[in-house]
Image (spheres, rainbow, N blue to C red):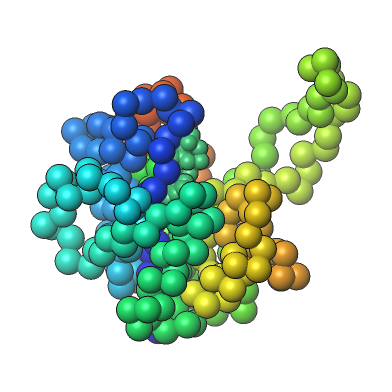
Amino acid sequence: MSIIALLPAAGSGSRMGAAMPKQYLPLCGKTVMEHTVAALHAVPEIDLVAVVVSPDDTRWGELDWGGFDRLKVLRCGGDSRAASVCNGLEALRAEGFDAQSWVLVHDAARPCVSPDLVSGMIAALKDDPVGGILAVPVADTLKAADASQRIAATRPRDGLWQAQTPQMFRLQPLHDALVSGMGPDITDEASAIEKTGQSPKLIHGSPWNLKVTYPQDLHLASLILASASH
Ligand code: CTP
Ligand code: MG
């Protein structure tokens, strides 16, 4: 049974506000995307790294992917992250991958994920009936705001986790859950699976596995990549 990493990389990076999508911005001598692909490609259990880019992407082909023998680009990105993932899953099925293959969906914008963390996740979930996600317990006190930005309530953080990626589910069940649940509230794969009545497992992720969203995240990511401990 195959284990596939699927990297949605068709976003525009509007919150970054850069001249190009953030996955192509420079980071420690490479692009963000090259770090992310290298991290997933270094996971020995992963048979294929499939990257979903926008159909009009011109930058993927300008990079040197010669060192990666288990890498494929799918030019089928959609209008939302969920649509890009859904289209990528359909492309994998059309190429003959088994419906029960494990798929690890990982944001192209999370370049600091460690291969060891992903290997541990695969070991923890490969016999799981549902699948699961990397996540970290919430550390800060949570405040609910009213309309004038005053505190309306303090929410207990016990039992609350912040979702990360990879998110690991079986190919066809994930595709079907995304199709049936498609809407603005589906912000990750787990939320689509939850809508089907199943409970994905939470696997301890890492604070180093940050998503590059705003300009200052690039600075943080460069510090993490420069440290040996991530
Ligand atoms: N993504 C995608 N297709 C989209 C939107 C997002 O493949 N239509 C990808 C992004 O490229 C990124 C990941 O999903 O790797 C996480 O999304 P996000 O951090 O929101 O990236 P962007 O949508 O590009 O950024 P923004 O929301 O600031 O515009
Ligand atoms: Mg987005």
Residue 132: x and y in percent read 58, 64
Q: Could you tell me if residue 135 is visible in this image?
A: no
Q: Residue at position x 72%, y 64% from top?
A: 195
On-image quarter of the C terminus: top left
Is residue 78 shown above or below 15? below
Left or right relative to 146: residue 16: left
Picture residue at 75% right of the left edge, 70% below the top: 197
**Residue nearer the viewer, 80 or 24:** 80
| 74 left or right of 85 in image | left
Residue at the image point whose x is 26% and y is 52% from the top: 38
Q: Quadrant of residue 141?
A: top right
113 shown above or below 75: above
Task: Give the quadrant of residue 52.
Answer: bottom left
Q: Residue 87: x and y, percent?
A: 44, 64
Give the residue furthest to the front: 56
Residue 162 placed where, x, y %?
A: 63, 44
Asked if residue 97 lies left or right of residue 82, the reply is: left
Question: Which quadrant would the N terminus be assigned to in this image?
Answer: bottom left
Quick check: can you spot residue 177?
yes
**94 sits to left or right of 202:** left
Tell how many labels. Answer: 0
